[in-house]
Image: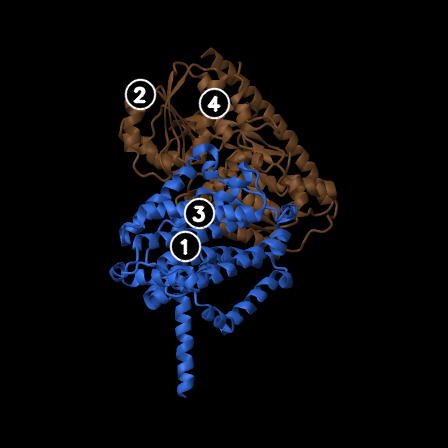
Chain colours: A brown, B blue
Amino acid sequence: MNERNTRISRRHFLKGSAAVTTLGSLAGCALLQEDFGGEEIDGIPDEPFRIVQVLFESGPPAFYGEEAMNASDMLVDQINEDGGLIGEREIEVVDRLDEDAGPDSLISDVQAMAQEGEVDMLMGIISSAHSLAVAPAADDQQFPFLVTMPGTYQLFEENPDMEYVVRTAGTNAAGAVGAVRMVEQMDDIETVVTVDPDYAWGHDHQEMFEAGLEAVGVDVEIIESRYPELGETDYSAHVSAIADQEPDLLFSSLWGGDIATFVSQGVDGGLFEAVDESLLIGDTGAPLLNSLGDAMPENVWLGGRGGYQPNYRYDEDESHREFVDEYYERYDQLPGWGAYHEWMGFQALQEGVESAVSIIGDWPTGEQLMAAMNNIAFEAPHGQHTMYGPQAVAPAVFGRPTDDHDLPVDHPLLGEFEFIEATEVNPPQDVLTMDWVDELEPVTG
Amino acid sequence: MSTRLPTFEDVQIKEVKGAILDKRLLTGGVLFVALALYPGLTMNAYHTRLLAWIMCFAIAALGFNVVLGYTGLLSFGHAAFFGTGMYTVVIAMQSAGITDLIVLLVLATLMAGVVGAIIGALSVKTHEIYFALLTLALAQLLYVLAARDVGGLTRGTDGIALNRPDFLGIPIGDAPAHIYLMGFYYHVILVCLFATIIVLWIVLRSPFGLTLKMIRENEMRAEMSGVPILRYRLYSMILSAMIVGLGGALYAVVVGHITPEYLDWTMSGEIVFMTLLGGIGTFLGPVIGAGGFILLQEVALNFTTYWHFTMGLVLFVVVLTLREKGIWGGAKALVDRVNDRRDDS
């Protein structure tokens, strides 16, 4: 594990640099704030900045939507307490669209909003498939759309010319390639079984993971790939089959209620005794640990595309601590991935407005605002959250379940964090994800 | 015993001529002109899109009613035809490089007809619940093929985006989205809807349509009269599939992004819902049902998060109170009753 120690120390160094950059950025923001205080900004509309959110309010993924709704209510209140965007214009969430209505209805609503001109921005969306349908439609209507949650790498690769869309969530490459990076560091892994949901998210992850492993040249074999249905309730057949194979590693991008059910049934079926290690990368962390409680096995790595774990850099990062504390105080639970994704979205909005106003000296149009959200960086639990053009690049963060934490919940959280830098798990700008994964270079310590 | 079967040639010319003077046709003409002028007069892109959406599903529901209302077969697999229409357009554009709208619509309609023939051939021997389940199962096979991205054509559940087609060599697809819809594509859908109504009106009043009704009313009697029931059921499935496929093909361009959800049984359920809502026992009921369903969904979504419940409640009330007449048949009955009372007084 010498190589691993070397890498971790390098990551500590990177975290240090990220912190320095963050401070620099904050100082810059503070200067901007001072500028706004000294000058009168022209053209700030009298009415609040009106946002319509789109997320699942019904159906199986609604828990993800609920976290996002909670976080946005909290963040809007916080921003408005400080006077609103750039301290001058309050935010109002004027409506929420239920994603369960499907893309037909969502696209129609986008058209209505663009037509009526009474909404400034659409924000949110959970499903990757929905984002692929709604984002180009919003762009067609020249209607600003801040995409906060879906992970499909195809969003901007299929629609490279969108000017009214930005996405503050990292793509699913970060999770899948992050898992490859983790395997690179592991000793004694020769056989792997993958289990992923049977739709594009799961297939994308599996393909990237397999192609990445092959490209970096680690000597492991994927002996079986299983694809349970999305929303599966009985994983017993999968659990038995995987346990029989006794692979060295279990890889999974199951998420939400699916991963909770799978792990729970896996524990009952002795799955985690049959495998040496597991990498559960489907936006896993606090929500899963909350639902599993003490039943959570210890030989697993949880995480994915971002450091969205309540106790990750909790002590070091004041803004993260405030976010977690405030969320816990309001909702009596720790924030999950939906909440963190919304937080990133609101940070991008604030930063984008500040940036646009500082450049043009006036309140930005929708197009100017979205352009201003390109190529910016802002603070996140994992350090700087950087936008490559309109797309965020997130690092991968994984951790082990542990009861050794100071947060006021009686379930395990993560510890022994592994941080993998964004540039190691995302393609360079303007390079297609799968092309990059196919040529992935091994990380050398 | 003569086994000669009625054909389209037996359509009574006089009947058609008489119909031209029919006030219903006049109303239809006025409605067509009003709808055609609507986008230009209001310049409301949202309403235009909503109308385009409704009209595409109205075509699909009309097509579905050929099987349900006229032949008496409840299919839960019509999403297969709708989705086939959609995927044919996008695959023909992306893989074969066909960009002309007319060619795409014809191709999609024919392809849906082929799928209708296959599913029909495999299912028309069954009845009632078995027919419903068999069509559902066969349609789900297509859903799985699309969701699994078999052949690498559909891009799985993430779906596949399509560009706007051109028209007769004119590169109108390059126009901005709202101009394309309001100035051109909406009118294409409108023409297709009215053409579908006219064609179906003629076909279903022809001996062919009357034969379908005969099968629906009394299968044994039809069989005893020498009607090859299975063949006629198959014909009705093909006709129905082609019209539903046309609706899907038209809708593909409106929505701009195709996912396997359009092949799923829930989409079949929506088409059944629309048809039931409008009234399966009426010719124009499905059109009203499509409009009612989509408007109801839009209104319910705006006012409550319990929109699924609201939709279910409305269907429950409509089916319970109006039965096969649906909204359209119920409204007609109401008008007749009011007229009767006026005459009495």
Position of B233 with respect to B8 (left or right) is left
Q: On what subunit does the disc labeled 1 rest?
A: B
Residue contact between numbered discs 1 and 2, judged by CB atoms under 8 Å: no
Residues beneath discs 1 and 4 located on the same chain: no
Q: Mark 4 or mark 2: which is in front?
A: 4
Q: Amino acid at mark 2?
A: Glu
Q: Amino acid at mark 4?
A: Ala
Determine which residue is flagged by label 1: B271
Determine which residue is flagged by label 4: A211
Secondary structure beneath label 3: helix
Q: Amino acid at mark 3?
A: Ala
Q: Position of residue B197 (x, y in %)?
A: 48, 61
Q: Mark 3 or mark 1: which is in front?
A: 3
Q: Residues within 10 Å of mark 3 (few under 14, many from 20)?
A: many
Mark 4 and mark 2: Cα distance apart in space? 22 Å
Determine which residue is flagged by label 3: B112
